[in-house]
Amino acid sequence: MESTKYPQFTKFEIARIIGARALQIAMDAPLLIKISEPELKALKYDAIALAERELELEALPIAINRPSPRKRKDKLQIIKEEKVSDEELVAKEQQVEKEIVEAGEELGLVQVDESDADDVAAGPEEQ
């Protein structure tokens, strides 16, 4: 096998691919190509020859992961924080609680008394 035949692979990758596939074939893995009995006899049932044949016919579902030699350094960026007052946070929490209670009532999961509904709407400051 020449690497000029498979320009996308190096000679080391080709050797690894054929070796791995030959091992699979030797352990009775099914062939990925249809090959006749006379062809098998001509190849002398050789696992390496069969693996080479599968590679030639591009029947192998092979993916090669090559590590990239470039290691990039990411620049740290300043995180922008929104300034929110405590009153806005409390109002937002009350709104979320109210939506949860309303959703629970619609689904029949929560039965709220009139006094409980007023407590949720009033918030923790007025209780």
Image (tube, rainbow, N blue to C red):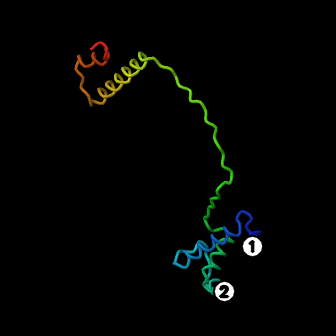
Q: Indicate the position of residue 27 as horizontal and vertical percent values.
A: 52, 78
Q: Indicate the position of residue 98 as horizontal and vertical percent values.
A: 34, 22
Depicted 13 relative to depicted 125: above or below: below
Q: Nearer the viewer, residue 89 or 28?
A: 89
Q: Indicate the position of residue 108 as horizontal and vertical percent values.
A: 27, 30
Q: How many tags in the picture?
A: 2
> Which numbered dot is residue 2?
1
Q: Nearer the viewer, residue 105 or 116?
A: 116
Quarter of the figure with the C terminus: top left
What type is the residue that disc 1 sits on? Glu
Residue lying furthest right: 4
Look at the numbered disc 1 and give the secondary structure of its residue: loop
> Which numbered dot is residue 65?
none
Look at the numbered disc 2 and give the secondary structure of its residue: helix
Residue lying furthest top: 126
Q: Can you identify the residue that label 2 sits on?
A: 42
> In the visual, does 111 lie left or right of 11?
left
Q: Indicate the position of residue 6 as horizontal and vertical percent values.
A: 73, 67
Q: What distance separates the C-alpha of mark 1 from that of mark 2?
A: 22 Å
What type is the residue that disc 2 sits on? Ala
Q: Nearer the viewer, residue 87 or 26?
A: 87
